[in-house]
Image (spheres, rainbow, N blue to C red):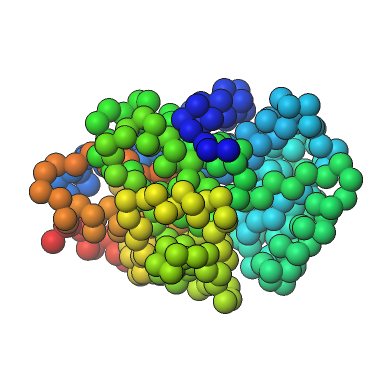
Amino acid sequence: MSLTLTDIRAAKKRVDSYINATPILSSSLMNQWLGHEIFFKCENFQKIGAFKARGGLNTVAWLVENNQKPKHIVANSSGNHAQAVAYAGQQFGIPTTIFMPEYSSQVKVQAARGYGAKVVLSKTRNITDVLVREAAGEAGTYWIPPFNHEQVICGQGTAALEALTELDDIDAVFTPCGGGGLTSGTLIATRGLAPKAKMFGVEPLNANDAAESLRKGSIQRLSGIPNTLADGAMTMAVGELTFEFLKQLDGFYEVAENDIVYWTQWLTHLLKCRLEPTCAMPMQAVVEWLKTQNTKQRVLVIISGGNMDQTTSQKIWEWDYLTQKPTLR
């Protein structure tokens, strides 16, 4: 199946009654400093506090629509996908079990339980992935993976669909990239609604499996748990489905940890809302791209979520970066 804008629109119809139509924010001060217009699709205001609600809900709604409602749902996640599937299971009255590594954000573990899911913790992501595969083999059980699923991808693409329907003449779109579901769905929506716009993915330099995969032409897997504050992009490897979409991007950026911290502080300050390091990360890529442009650009950034625990928050605010004004110089 080749996914198109039609599939993203079908997903939007399925999820509309379950999700928030999230706002698009901008900072006149940042636009003045950088000399360009930057728009932020704020999925930190989404149900569960992240875009992942879209993919989880669309997948379950699609199953129900096709008379395939499962008796039990399982999922594996270190973050927001756990909450998304738990929330979707709650909405459709389906028992849900989430398998998570022990290093997962405690805020996200507690949230998954809060939505009624059973949470099974294991020492590593690899063990988590084995356990979910075993559980998925049980009769009546359906496994919703974090990104490597067509309906998950379509659901994630609805955020960009909303934004690009509202905004005209966007020149470039940037998304954070973990497993590639958001980036893939956004690519489909962007190619359909703003075909002239450039599309970029962004990941942490310390968890750069996607960039390595694109460089080597085959999926590369991280050898161990990556040391990054962008916990939403700690995926060990991209999926076979998402990798094919990542190959179609106009570019891919890797961002150092200090830049992730810098932009988390500045976006929190300028947009006046709570957001995760993962979704602040693309701003460094935006700045690097804008340095190569000779005319004023209109840029869309997908803010993926706002779920951050105390430990991460303390690390983000350990040093004051707000004394260093954003600039293209």
Q: For this rendering, which residue is in front, 148 or 177? A: 148
Q: Residue at x 52, y 36 (%)?
A: 3
Quadrant of the image occupied by residue 323: bottom left
Q: Residue at x 37, y 36 (%)?
A: 191
Name the side, left or right, on which 62 lies relative to 218.
right
- Locate residue 145, reporting x and y percent: 66, 50
Q: Decide: is 169 above or below 300.
A: above
Q: Residue at x 50, y 55 (%)?
A: 243
Q: Residue at x 49, y 51 (%)?
A: 244
Residue sitting at the far bottom: 223
Viewport quadrant of the C terminus: bottom left
Q: Is residue 246 visible?
A: yes
Q: Decide: is 285 above or below 220.
A: above
Q: Is residue 263 visible?
A: no
- Locate residue 203, reporting x and y percent: 42, 61
Name the side, left or right, on which 248 lies relative to 107.
left
Name the side, left or right, on which 218 lies relative to 325.
right
- Locate residue 266, reporting x and y percent: 31, 54
Q: For this rendering, which residue is in front, 78 or 207? A: 207
Quadrant of the image occupied by residue 85: top right
